[in-house]
Each structure stands twice: as C-alpha cells, then as structure tokens.
Image: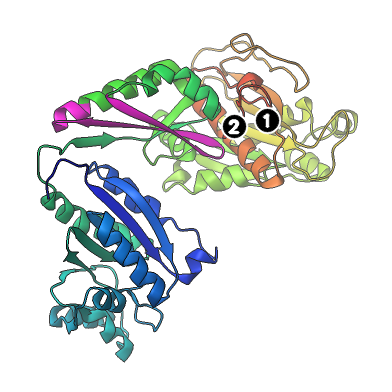
Amino acid sequence: MAGGCRVKAEIITIGDELLRGEIVDSNKARIAERLLLLDLECRHQVSVLDDPEDMRDAFRRAADRSDFVLVSGGLGPTRDDLTTEVLAETFGRKLELDEASLAAIEAFFARVGREMAEVNRKQAYFPSGADVLPNPIGTAPGFSIREGRAVFFAVPGVPRELDRMMDEQVLPRIERLMVGPERHVVRATLLRTFGMGESTLESELLDLARDGEVDLGFRTSFPDNFLRPVARAGTAAEADARIAQVTAAIRARLGPIVYAEGDETMESVVGRMLTERGLTIATAESCTGGLIAERITDVPGSSAYFLGGVVPYSNAAKISLLGVSEAVLEKEGAVSEPVVRAMAESVRTRFGSDFGVATSGISGPDGGTPEKPVGLVWIALSVGEGALGEAREEGHGERHGESTVPGTESTRSARNGTFADSFVFPVDRSRHRMLTAQVALDWVRRSMLGAELVGPSLLRRSGGGSAPGGS
C-alpha cells in the first residue's frame, strides 16, 4: 500500500454497553497507541450499537475513507454478536466454515474441561476470502478482509485477547502491507510525573514541545501527569536517538518530578528502590485507611520490604496501638504535626523498619473547622538512623496557611529523623485519599534519591494549575 498521502486508519468499536456508558471503551486507546508506532494516522474513531443498520453504515463509511479499519467486538457466540455476519453482508460475501478454527475452538473447551455449546460453532464462520487470525487465549478468532482501498481487521472486544491479537496478528500484517517512501520509523515512550500540573509542565517544556523532530504530548491521569514524546525518522537508529535525546532533556529539566518511564507505577518504583537498597517500610494510616499499604502490597515481592501497617482511625487506636500521648491528642487534635510525627516514629520503631509513614487528615465532606478545613492533611516520614547514610537536620515544612514561592520553600532532604508537612487538597474524599497516598510514597522515593521532599508550592491549590493532575 503506497501513495503520496499519509496512510489513514479508523477504529470501530461495537457494543450496546459502550454507548450506554456501562463500561469504559478502553479498546480505542489500546488500538490507537499501537497504530501510532507504525506511523498510522488514526483519523476516525466510531462506536456503534449492536444494530445491523448502524454497523453497515459505519463499515461503508470506513471503506470509503480509510486504508486500515480496526473493528473491535461482536465476535462472540450470542445472537447480538453480529460483526462477522454484518461485515459479510455489507460487502456481498458469504459465510464459510473454517475447519481449522472449529478444531481450535473445540480444543480450547477441551483444555478447560468444558463441553463446547452448539452456539460456539458460529465463531468458526468467516466472510468468504477472509484471512483468519488465530486467537490463542479465547474462543473468538479474528479475521481480515480487503474491500477496495480498505483492509478490515476484526478482533475480539475482550482487552486481554485484543492486546495479544493486535501484537501477534494484526500489526505484523499491517506492517507488511505498508510500503513506499512515505514510511517512517516511529518511537514513543511515556514519562510519568508527579508534583507539577499539566499547564506548568507544558510551560517548562515549551521549547521541546515545539521541536519539529519530536512531538510531545501531555495527559492528565489523577494524581499524575504523563508526558509522551513521539519521534519519527527514516531509520530505527535515528528514531531511537531522538527519543533518547528528548527523554534525557526532559529528565534533566524536571529532575525527580519524573518518577518513572513506561508502565511502572509509583508503588513499583518505591518497591524496586527499597529492594535495591535492602530497606524496609511500615505504615500508620488514619485518613488513608490502609490505602498506602494496599498499594505497596499490590506489587509482587513486596513481602521483602513491607513489614506491616496499622490503621489507627480513632484516637483510642492511636493511643493503644502506637502509644500516641493522650495529652497531645487532646491539646493538638488528631490532625496535627505532633500526632502524625509520633505515629510515623512509633510505627517505624515497633515494626523495626527503616521507614515509617503516617497520615492524618480530614478527607471530608464534613468535619472541618476554620482552623482545620476539610482537605487538610498531615503527612510524616520517619527515617531510621543509618538507613540513608549520614544524619541531616530534622525539619518540617510550612503549614498550609503560609504562602510559598517556588524555589524558596524550606523543604529538606529526609535522611535520618522525621519530616512532616501539611497540605490542603480541595478535592473529593476519594481523590483526597489517593493524593495523600501518592505524596507519602513520593516522599519515600525522594528520600532514597536524596532529593527535596515536595513542598506546598508544587501542590498548591491555585496559581498556574500546579495541583497534581490539574490544568
């Protein structure tokens, strides 16, 4: 497939549940992300009901305007799975049984110890002239057909099966069909950032974003912001070099605000760093209710560094489980610096860990006062002696009511001792807990890097869109 114009791709997802909002249509993103790596311009994304008339209309339009059409969904055995039948009817093709596919479906059911229902035979029929795409992990094979300028690829809507078939069946076929001087090699990566808002990031990286050789995209996924550099070049070596160059430039400019590349999450990064250094952690969570511990233990192998955690939600639990002073609780309140410091130090000592993390806040929607508004949270990180090398001065950050100027706030590098700071996050209860957990994990990461713990100027609620995930 060659020519002077850019090759165009289209994605069609099929299913009543998509248009009713019953599920999130993530398949479009999964497909588009893969097409990008082939330098395919995705010009149209369409969702249609399980309705033959709507499907026929979508297929005809796609055949007229696109070179490659990726169709997801409607390949199952039930009456409302109509993709194969409607595609065949739309382009005047008969349905034909593929004996190899039928045998593969029967073998699949035999492997899982189930008898194949008669309705599953339907999944072995394809439009005449179709190229069958095997599905090694499901009962619904895919297929491709050419109609005029357009090549249609039909794949299952189950994300796990779609991913496998796109990578093993669809993309190699598309790549073989794409020939001509207009072809480019495309390389892309994903940089995950935390602590700086989308608009601020764009301002900081404006010159890189305008580089003609690299496209730089920005995307928010609360509480993070993602950067996606995309490079096109005539050869793989040139594209790799451009991506490496712009990635290094971004990291040099943003420093520890970039916490990962690719699919690695904050908890994965923290776990890897703890493992590499032979360090351990324990948690004492009030307002986050065990969310930090849950995220840490979501990572395989976390038993090597996570010693345990407590959720002392009530004052009585803070006293009995962690030995927090009753007098301090009465004088300062649970959401206060002395209490959260005591929690972090106590959980570290009692579990014998290198790090102790503690949270106490008012996640809302009620419970605030003028002095302690809804959204206020105190976070503390206690670091054991010798865990990170030489001792540094113990410190605390500004309280939530004090203004700061970027670059002048009194944040510290946490080495030995305890660091505590307060923030006001003006978000709903769920996001308040999520953001608090992310800050706490980020502090652990930054402390191991010897970097400053993020101060309020990077997490303030107004000015320049600098709240995490904000714009």
x and y, in percent, of residue 202 in the image? 48, 24
Q: Distance between the residues labelled 2 and 1?
A: 8 Å
Residue at the spot 17% in from the left edge and 26% down from the top edge:
238
Q: In this view, does 316 lie above or below 22?
A: above
Q: How crowded is mark 1: few (under 14 residues within 10 Å), some or many (20 or more)?
A: many
Three-letter code, disc 1 = Ile
Can residue 27 be seen from the camera position used here? no
The residue indicated by pointer 2 is 439
Q: In this view, does 166 lie above or below 377?
A: below
The residue indicated by pointer 1 is 379
Which residue is nearer to you in this view: 227 or 292?
Answer: 227
Where on the picture, by quarter, is residue 365? top right
x and y, in percent, of residue 60 in the image? 30, 66
How many dots with numbers? 2
Tag 1 secondary structure = strand
Residue at the spot 42% in from the left edge and 75% down from the top edge:
51
Residue at the spot 37% in from the left edge and 21% down from the top edge:
210
Q: What are the residue bounds of the magenta stretch?
A: 213-240
Three-letter code, disc 2 = Val
Which residue is nearer to you in this view: 184 or 469?
Answer: 184
Taking the image as shown, residue 76 lies to the left or right of residue 330, namely left
x and y, in percent, of residue 462 in the image? 68, 25
Going from the N terminus, do you reach mark 2 or mark 1 first? Answer: 1
Query: Is 413 part of what is drawn in magenta?
Result: no
Taking the image as shown, residue 392 lies to the left or right of residue 368, namely left
Question: Where the C terminus falls, by quadrant?
Answer: top right
Q: Is residue 61 above or below residue 361?
A: below
